[in-house]
Amino acid sequence: MDEPNNLMVITIALLFDQRLDYQQLRATVEDRLLPFERFRQRIVHQRDQKPHWELDPRFMLAAHLHRYGLPGAGGDAELRELLGELISTPLDPTRPLWKFFLIEHYGDGCALVLRIHHCMADGMALIAIFNAFLDQPISDQVTTSLAPASEPASGPFTQAVETISTALRTTEQIVQRGWGWISHPERAISLLGSGAAVLTKLALMGRDADSMLKGELCGLKRAAWSETVALSEIKALGKHLGGTVNDVILTAISGALRRYMAAHGASISPRGLRAVVPVNLLPPGATSNGGNNFGLVYVTLPVCTDDPVERMARLRREMDAIKASPEAYIGYGVISILGNLPADVEQTLLSSLSDMASMVITNVPGPRETNTFMGHPVARAMFWVPESSKLSLGISILSYAGKVQVAVVADANVMPDPEALGAAVDAEFAELFTLL
């Protein structure tokens, strides 16, 4: 699903207050990641055959580990500039689809950036990767509150990033969980009715409202992020207003988009703006084997609503309806079908699906406690979600060590200043917390 203006590559940054030693980093990557075969495999395209994985006969760690120094003051502005350049750059398709970048001269510390293609892992699979990569294993993984409320039983999952056969087994388990609903007669009629309703909803959804986010893409990316927010405060506000953590965060993001658009003199549709949201399909407590285990749902953000309480109430009603339906599983089926269609048909359908939204928003739970890498505490962690087809904006939410971080990536032609949206997120959270 790569396109010249939108690369399907996830970018993750770990920020440190201390410097990392490059040679030790090289040895650590070799010791902790290279035992996983996928990190030594490339995708091979052969005539009349489906693309497949094979070990890269020319594999060299040096081609995947790079070292940069920030210029000037070496602050957030310089890091944002470099991240935008990295996110805009395709990975070498003839090699394994990942790269590490050690970014030095970032204040008194450094940043470690991983770029990994979405075909290797989704957000939850990346947690499994970092489970092997960081110094302490990540236990007690939680699933995003966007996960469907009704979860059929499923078998156990291992905690390693394994070969493609394991990823396929994971896919099979997801399908079995979907069919597990049908195995219960009391759920069958409800499921069929709900599924038909979801398909009707998608068929009638149509193009999202015109807005400043629907401009022509140039392919050059800009990256930014918000300040961190205490997860405990978000939970307290959600409890106070009768919503979830995710309801609060989406309320803040909706308000931030409203602020940003108003500040730029842009019109705001009374219909709101739709976001396509990846949903984790693994059952609670399960960890990913690698690959992609997500469905897609469409969420309407009430950017037209000024009152944050009303905004959250609208979001809560919509999210409750989505979580009670099989929409995410149907979205997973759509993704699976797309991957098996001819490229031109796939691109046409993908373009139609992207027309139905204005952005992608994803929420991934990270470690609950501060973790370390090479003996150094990870001070902050954030990531930037890839956008598909004609989408211009990606918003990523990551919880880490009791704090929530929102990161923004945007096409420079549509949103040249995503740091202004990050600041608007900060302002919205500050206003929301006055309600406590």
Image (cartoon, rainbow, N blue to C red):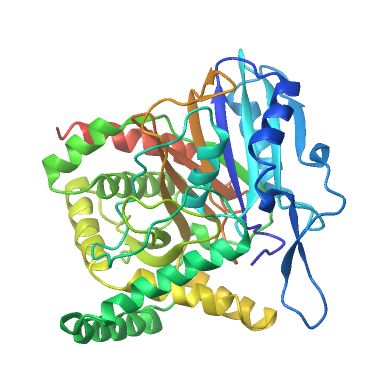
Count of numbered circles on the image:
0
Instruction: Decide if residue 235 is in sight here.
Output: yes
Rendered position, 42 above or below 370 = below
Quarter containing the C terminus: top left
Residue at left offset 82%, top offset 57% = 94
Residue at left offset 81%, top offset 54% = 56
Residue at left offset 51%, top offset 67% = 169
Quarter containing the N terminus: bottom right
Which residue reaches farthest right?
Answer: 58
Nearest to the observer: residue 284 or residue 221: 284
User: Taking 48 as reference, is 329 left or right?
Assistant: left
Q: Position of residue 99 (x, y in %)?
A: 71, 42
Nearest to the observer: residue 7 or residue 59: 59
Task: Kindly indicate the quadrant of the structure image that contains residue 338.
Answer: bottom right
Task: Kindly indicate the quadrant of the structure image that contains residue 132.
Answer: top right
User: Taking 406 as reference, is 187 left or right?
Assistant: left
Instruction: Decide if residue 209 is in sight here.
Output: no
Q: Position of residue 423 (x, y in %)?
A: 43, 34
Rendered position, 428 above or below 119 = above
Q: Position of residue 209 (x, y in %)?
A: 42, 68
Which residue reaches farthest top?
Answer: 108
Task: Kindly indicate the quadrant of the structure image that contains residue 173.
Answer: bottom left
